[in-house]
Amino acid sequence: MTTIETPTPEWPKTHEVLARLHAWSKPLREQPDFRAFNRRKISAAIDLDGRDPEPAAGNFDIPSEIAAEYDAVMKFYYLHAACDRLQSLHLYFRRYPFRPGEMRKVEHLQNMFDLFSSAFYVVLQRVETYLNALEPLAGMDLQIGWWVKRYRKDFANELGPRNQTTHHRPYDDIVYDRLWVSEVMGLKDGDGGASWQREHQAIYRRETRR
């Protein structure tokens, strides 16, 4: 069996933070009201009989003395989830799950690249939100503005296409043109069309790997 190695690096400090947050949350998780709240959420989730199930969990009021800490903790979890999602997006490029005629390969690649570039913006926003929630608890200036500028500089190649697509026009890439041309030329009859079809497949495989 072939094993596909994902490009997910190990970050010991992240694992350490997650372990500490789990320990921090233990007193909250052991509160009877919080346990009952979570049971209601699970019950609502597994109630599969209703066609349009209503949220039945209600709300849980976090104790005021830990509200700020809880807010920062949850924002870290949301940031971690966004980073984890970004790490997995390479799988979307590797797989083309459509039957012939449902979606053209150039459209699939465009959609996946738009999703990929947008994920970098989501991470940026969640880092900024997390640091803003953490700063009062840390009691120090976390240099949020500097960090945002550095992130935008380091990931300009990813954020630029997202900004262009959102605010101006679809992001253009020579790869899209090559896929379109090879697809159109592949419609020709005879060996010429078949040759272009093979080239179309080769371009798609090469560029999704890249």
Image (cartoon, rainbow, N blue to C red):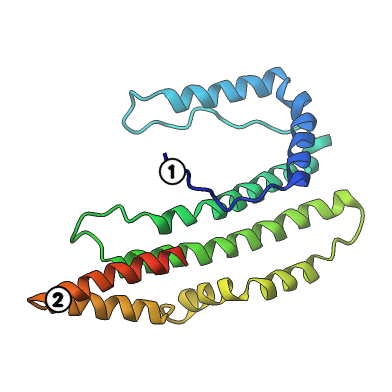
SS category of the residue bearing label 2: helix
Residue 122 x, y percent position in the rendering = 59, 60
Q: Left or right? Give the position of 175 relative to 189.
A: right
In which image quadrant can residue 113 be found?
A: bottom left
Q: Is residue 158 visible?
A: yes
Count residues near mark 2 (Cα–Cα under 10 Å), then give few for <14, some for 14-19, many for 20+: some
- The residue at 81%/36% (across/down) is 66
- The residue at 56%/55% (across/down) is 86
The residue singled out by tag 2 in the image is: 193
Spatial CA span between label 2 and label 1: 33 Å
> Which is nearer the N-term, disc 2 or disc 1?
1
Residue type indicated by callout 1? Thr
**Number of numbered discs:** 2
The residue lying toward the viewer, choosing from 83 and 189, is 189
Residue 57 x, y percent position in the rendering = 54, 28
Residue type indicated by callout 2? Gly
Residue 97 x, y percent position in the rendering = 30, 52
SS category of the residue bearing label 1: loop
Count residues near mark 1 (Cα–Cα under 10 Å), then give few for <14, some for 14-19, many for 20+: few
The residue lying toward the viewer, choosing from 201 and 107, is 201
- In the current view of this chain or complex, which residue is farthest to the left? 189
The residue singled out by tag 1 in the image is: 2
Residue 69 x, y percent position in the rendering = 80, 41
